Image (cartoon, grey):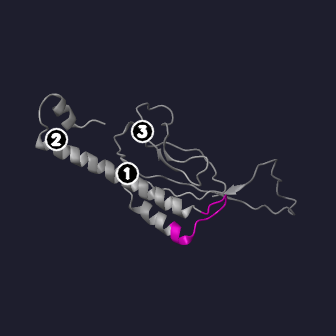
Amino acid sequence: MRFEGEVAAEKGRAPSKKSKRRQKKSMAAATASASAVQKLFDLCKEAFADCAPGFVPKQDDVGRLSSFLDNMKPEDVELHPNLPYFRHENSEGTPPVTYLHLYGCPKSKFSIGIFCLPQSSVIPLHNHPGMTVFSKILFGSMHVKSYDWVDTPHSSSNAAAPTDGDRLAKE
């Protein structure tokens, strides 16, 4: 990453006070966002330290993570609505969803990522078996539907038996 001061120096001029202020502001913003992501990483690492599939973190850890996410802002992860991820120029079809992977590795017990959803985009119905998911809307709004599995009584002769692998869900 180059700053204006570096360009001025290459041209043989000293950077102006204005460009120095911009450089400091830009560096401060980058540091603040790195600090927010680092703090989120540290909280997740602590919350999921004893993790296994189906594990629910301790209530204190859930509270700390939730509180931190409640206070996160788009600038904490250097996002703003003008980024190309959030624009949909083609009026036909569904807007594409972009996933920004921040952290995760095969041995890790958690991952951190950002889904960038343009206005009117849709993500498919999906499941997170054995996972604890924390979400945060950084800007905009979202309509969410969630479903729970229906326990069907096996003794009822009227109920249609689910076919191989199919299950019923209720909203």
Q: Label 2, on which residue?
A: 19
Q: Secondary structure at mark 2?
A: helix
Q: Residue furthest bottom?
A: 60
Q: Which percent across, then down, holds residue 43?
A: 48, 61
Q: Nearer the viewer, mark 3 or mark 1?
A: 1
User: How many neighbours does mark 2 have within 10 angstroms: few (below 14), some (14-19), or many (20 or more)?
Assistant: some
Tell me the CA gap for discs 1 and 2.
22 Å
21 or 154, which is in the foreground?
A: 21
Query: In terms of sequence position, does the residue under pointer 3 or pointer 1 come before the other?
Result: 1
Total residue callouts: 3
Q: Which residues are magenta?
A: 50-62
**Looking at the picture, which amino acid does disc 1 mark?**
Ala
Question: Quadrant of the rendered structure where residue 146 is?
Answer: bottom right
The amino acid at mark 3 is Tyr
Q: Which residue is mark 1?
A: 34
Judged left or right of residue 112, residue 81 is left
Q: State the residue at coordinates (40%, 32%).
A: 89
**Residue marked by disc 3:** 85
